Image (cartoon, rainbow, N blue to C red):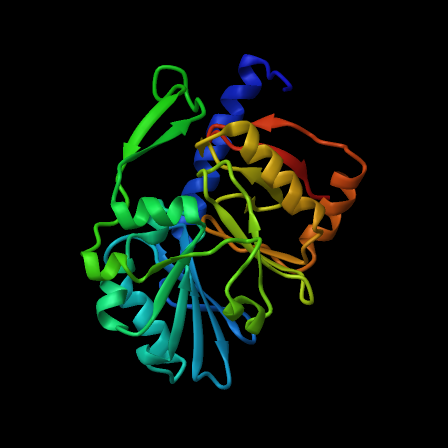
Amino acid sequence: MARFSRTARIMTIVSGIGIAAWLLTRQRTAQEALEPDIYAIPVTAGTYAYLLTKENPTRLLLVDTGVPGSERRILNCIAALGARAEHLEAIILTHWHRDHAGGLGALFDLVPHAFAYAHPIDAERIRSGTQGFIRVRGILPGLLTRGSLPQRPVELRPDQAARVRDLDPAAPPTLLADWGLTAIFTPGHTAGHIALYTSARGLLFAGDALGCFGRLVATPPLFDDEHAMEQSAAKLIALGPRRVFPGHVRPSPVGVMSTMKEISSAHVWKVLETVLGLGVRAQMS
C-alpha cells in the first residue's frame, strides 16, 4: 500500500471531511429514479434502499430496508409511484447489518405476505438475533484505530423470523430469475454478504461490498474479513457493470464502470487510503 507523507495525509483528511460534508448536504429526502424501473430510496443520510418495479408498477421488489424507522420512507416511495404496500413481492437483504436490515420487522407487519431473503449465513444471524462484530480499519490515529465493534441484528418476533428465507447463490429462488437478477456471493463485509447483478443491463446492487465515492471505486472501512472483502470487490469489478448501486454515499453515474473494468483487467490498481478508511482501488479518468 502506498504511503503518504504527513502533509499529504493531512490534506487527505481535510479533503475527505469536506467531501463527506458536501455529500450529506446533497442527501435527497425523496426517491430518485435511477432507471425507468429502479428507484433509490434515501432511508438515512448517505444510506439507500432500492425499489424495483414491474407492470406499471403492480409488482415490487425491495433491496435492503435501511435502519429501524425507514419503513415510512419506503412506503412513501411506493405510494408516490401509485402502488400499494401489498404489491411488494419480496425483500432481498444484502447482509445482516442494522443499516440494511433494520426496518425488516416493521415492514413485515405492514406487508404480511412478503418474505425476506438473505444468504444462509446472514439469514441465520437475522433469524436468531445473535450479536456479531464488525472489524474496523484504522481511520485516524488516536480517534479510531483497528478493532471491532459489537452490533446486533434487527429484533424479530418468532413469526417474523420464520419469514426470513435462505438465498443460496448456487440455487437461488425462482423470483430472482423472474426479475432478471443473479445473486453473487461476496463475503468480506459480512460472512454472508451478497450482491445482485443484472447481466443484461449491467446493473450491480453492491450492498456494502463495493461503493462509488465520486469517481473513486472503494471498499468500506468495516468488514468481517478484509482479505475476502477485497477479493469480492475485485470479482464485482471484473463484471464490468454499467452502473453500481451501493448501500452508501451515492449510486454511480452511467458509464463510470467501463473505465474501472479496463483498469481492473490490466491489473493496474492505484491503492490509496483516505480519512474515511476507504481502500480505494481505482481512480476514474
- Relative to 282, is 229 on the left or the right? left
Q: Does the rendering let one see residue 206?
A: no
Does residue 2 appear in this view?
A: yes
Q: Nearer the viewer, residue 37 or 116?
A: 116
Q: How many marks on residues?
A: 0
Residue 188's x, y, as percent?
50, 36
Q: Position of residue 268 (x, y in %)?
A: 76, 32
Residue sitting at 31 percent across and 48 percent down? 126
From this viewpoint, which residue is outermost toward the front? 171
* Residue lying farthest to the left in this orientation: 157
Is residue 169 positioned above or below 153 on the image? below
Give the residue drawn at x 65%, y 39%. Answer: 234
Q: Quadrant of the C terminus?
A: top right
Up the image or down, 125 lies above or below 197; here it is: above
Image position of 277 (left or right of 78):
right
Task: Residue 164 in the image: state x and y as whole percent.
Answer: 34, 58
Q: Is residue 46 left or right of residue 149?
A: right
Q: Nearer the viewer, residue 125 or 108?
A: 125
Return the x and y of residue 171 as percentages of the image width and height: 55, 58
